[in-house]
Image (cartoon, helix red, strand yellow):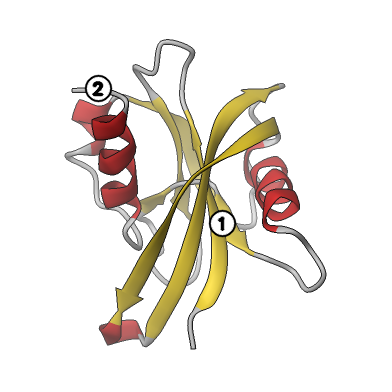
Amino acid sequence: MPEATVSAIITTPDRSKFLITRRKTGLYQGMWCLPGGHIDRDETMRDAVIREVKEETGLDFDPQLFFCFDEIIPEYDIHTITIVFDGTANGTITSQVEEVAEIGWYSLREIRKMAFAFRHKDIIESYAYQHGIC
C-alpha cells in the first residue's frame, strides 16, 4: 500500500534556481532532495508541507498544489504517492542539523549533474518543463 508524502518546490522569483537539501542520514544519505517528508496522523497535506519546509529550511512556505507523483523503488520496497507543492518562501534559511547536511540554491543545469534521492530530479524536470525553464 503506498504511503503519502509531500515535497516542496521553492524557486528564486525568476525561477532560475531551486532550493534543495542534501540528506544527512538514513536512506539515500548524502544525496540531494526537495524539502519534504511524511504526513503526520491527523495532518493535512498542506499543513505537512508547511511544517516540513519550516523544519528543514527555517522558511515560511506558502504552498500551491503542483502535481502528484508515484514513486516506486522496488529495491528499497518503497511505494509513495508524493504530493508536490510549489510556492514562495520567506525568512532566513537555517537547515535542520539532524537531517540536513547542506542546503542551497541551484540552477537546473547544476541539478542535472547532481545525485538525487527518490524521483526528485524527475519532479524538478517536470516542473521545469511545465514552466519553460531550460
- Which mark sits nearer the N-terminus, 2 or 1? 1
Say how many tags the image has: 2
- Above-or-below relation of 53 to 75: above
Tell me if residue 54 can be seen. yes
Give the x, y percent position of residue 28: 37, 66
Tell me if residue 59 can be seen. no
Q: Which labelled disc corresponds to residue 34?
A: none
Question: Is the C terminus in the top left, top right, bottom left or bottom right quadrant?
Answer: top left
Q: Say few, some or many: other residues with alpha carbon within 10 Å of mark 2 (under 14 / 14 to 19 / 20 or more).
A: few
Amino acid type shown at disc 2: Gly
The part of the image, by quadrant, that contains residue 85 is top right
Residue in the picture at 24% in, 33% down: 129
Q: For this view, does 99 lie left or right of residue 69?
A: right
Q: Among all residues in the image, which is located at the extreme top?
A: 14
Residue at image mark 2: 132
- Above-or-below relation of 57 to 93: below
Q: Among all residues in the image, which is located at the extreme right?
A: 42
Residue in the picture at 71% in, 47% down: 55
Residue in the picture at 34% in, 37% down: 127
Residue at image mark 1: 6
Q: Which is in the foreground here, disc 2 or disc 1?
A: 2
Q: Nearer the viewer, residue 3 or 96?
A: 3
Question: Helix or strand or loop: what does disc 1 sit on?
Answer: strand
Q: Nearer the viewer, residue 7 or 132?
A: 132
Amino acid type shown at disc 1: Val
Q: For this view, does 72 lie left or right of residue 20?
A: left
